[in-house]
Image (spheres, rainbow, N blue to C red):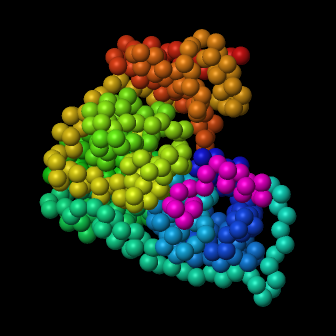
């Protein structure tokens, strides 16, 4: 039921009102007494929020409703309100017909695999006795969560003297970013700032294809930086002052270099570019690779030696601030960096870059297919890594074949130190998948 990003899928089939009620009951059965709830702007968010709140209160738990907020705001609010659990109603970057439920701990980290498993078992058992009539839980509204998050960002980031930033909110919950940047001293213009769960302006996921309007706008103006969020603002991607959309691996390398020093560790998933390893090696730092998914990066980031964690998809974690991917915080950190060190295009040009190819293949029965891929990879290659999917490393690069945690897809990533090496590695990975499909 739970993937790495909680429960996520199409509303009415995969994610239903009945499921939301039962998850609310399960959270209390697992020991929660106070639960903070938030949602993104999706049209189905209010009804799922009402259902989950009803399940919590029916079981005797109390609810604090933050309303429509960014996911990192909700994640921080669990500790701010001395709650036991946070619940965010969101499908993040998925299309508007989807929704989801993601659970958060007071540390700001999403539920790990063990705790997700406990909730899943309670949901499947579906054996609950409601609280007595005079012991049902209460619900109170809290409208200050976004303002408190904005203030926390301003406290954590150096002021900006002169910087012009365009923020493409994508009709999501990321309006907090514009407020935080203005408070830091930036001149801010917004695009698609009106929350609308239908995401009429562009797809929710801030890919290069989706951010064409932002790229064109930044390139045509004197803006220094463009920021783009997904629907719940846990992700952040950027456009440099020339209108170019940098790869997520380049941003990861830039953030890692800014956060780490001699002896420090950065956490990132198995599909991270070799460029990050090389950048960290130059300053005496190192990269530790995790399973793909922000919760796995966060699990490693809570160790004392890790100063930063990130994913090329746009999830950025500064563990001294929060273990949640915080898109608004990342936007503020990047704005301060550009203001201090110069144009983003020039900062990125200083970084090493290797040809990297990522593609997805829609499949049925992805788990069985991945078992076949793993078997054939072990037969053909030495040094196969099975931490998450199948990763094969060679002297001239690596490839990764991995099933998506939320969609019926198998993702292929290949990177070589030359174009020829990348093409060869990708072809080998794709052949493994195609052979498994035919088999």
> Is residue 122 highlighted in magenta?
yes
Residue 46 at x, y percent in the picture: 60, 69
| Residue 104, picture quadrant | bottom right
Answer above or below: position of 401 versus 167: above
Picture quarter containing residue 356? Answer: top left
The answer to whether residue 113 is magenta is: yes
Span highlighted in magenta in the image: 104-123
Q: Along the horizontal axis of the image, is 127 left or right of 289?
A: right
In the image, residue 295 above or below residue 332: above
- Residue 222: x percent and y percent? 15, 52
Question: Residue 414's spot in the image, x, y percent?
Answer: 45, 23
Q: Residue at 52%, 62% (x, y): give it.
A: 107
Q: Is residue 299 above or below residue 41?
A: above
Asked if residue 393 can be seen in this view, the reply is: yes
Which residue is drawn at the image coordinates 60% and 41% (left, top)? 405
Residue at 39% of width from left, 31% of height from top?
A: 273
In the image shown, does 411 or 394 lie closer to the viewer? 394
Instruction: Compare residues 230 and 151 and report the one nearer the observer.
Output: 151
Image quarter for residue 131? bottom right
Looking at the image, is 26 positioned above or below residue 312? below
């Amino acid at each position: 039921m739970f993937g790495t990003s909680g429960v996520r899928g199409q509303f009415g089939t995969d994610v239903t009102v009945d499921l939301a009620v039962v998850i609310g009951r399960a959270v209390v059965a697992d020991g929660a007494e106070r639960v903070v709830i938030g949602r993104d702007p999706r049209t189905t968010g209010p009804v799922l929020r009402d259902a989950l709140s009803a399940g919590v209160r029916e079981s005797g738990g109390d609810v604090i409703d933050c309303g429509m907020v960014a996911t990192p705001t909700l994640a921080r609010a669990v500790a701010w309100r001395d709650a036991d659990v946070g619940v965010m109603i969101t499908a993040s970057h998925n299309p508007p017909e989807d929704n989801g439920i993601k659970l958060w701990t007071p540390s700001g980290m999403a539920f790990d695999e063990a705790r997700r498993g406990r909730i899943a078992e309670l949901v499947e058992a579906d054996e609950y006795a409601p609280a007595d009539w005079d012991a049902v839980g209460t619900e109170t509204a809290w409208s200050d969560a976004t303002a408190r998050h904005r203030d926390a960002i301003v406290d954590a980031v150096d002021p900006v003297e002169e910087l012009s930033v365009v923020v493409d909110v994508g009709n999501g919950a990321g309006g907090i970013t514009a407020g935080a940047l203005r408070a830091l001293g930036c001149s801010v213009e917004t695009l698609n700032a009106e929350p609308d769960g239908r995401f009429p302006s562009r797809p929710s996921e801030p890919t290069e294809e989706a951010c064409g309007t932002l790229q064109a706008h930044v390139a045509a103006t004197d803006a220094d930086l463009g920021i783009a969020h997904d629907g719940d603002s846990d992700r952040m991607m950027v456009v440099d002052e020339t209108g170019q959309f940098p790869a997520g691996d380049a941003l990861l390398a830039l953030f890692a270099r800014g956060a780490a020093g001699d002896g420090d560790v950065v956490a990132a998933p198995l599909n991270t570019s070799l460029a990050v390893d090389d950048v960290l090696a130059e300053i005496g730092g190192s990269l530790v690779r995790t399973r793909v998914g922000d919760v796995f990066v966060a699990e490693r980031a809570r160790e004392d030696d890790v100063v930063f964690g990130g994913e090329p998809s746009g999830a950025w974690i500064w563990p001294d601030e929060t273990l949640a991917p915080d898109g608004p915080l990342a936007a503020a950190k990047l704005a301060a960096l550009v203001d201090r060190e110069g144009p983003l295009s020039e900062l990125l040009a200083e970084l090493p870059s290797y040809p990297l190819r990522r593609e997805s293949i829609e499949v049925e029965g992805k788990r069985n297919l991945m078992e076949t891929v793993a078997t054939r990879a072990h037969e053909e290659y030495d040094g196969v890594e099975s931490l998450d999917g199948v990763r094969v490393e060679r002297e001239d690069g690596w490839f990764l074949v991995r099933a998506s945690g939320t969609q019926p897809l198998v993702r292929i990533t290949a990177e070589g130190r030359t174009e020829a090496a990348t093409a060869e590695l990708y072809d080998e990975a794709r052949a493994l998948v195609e052979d498994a499909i035919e088999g």
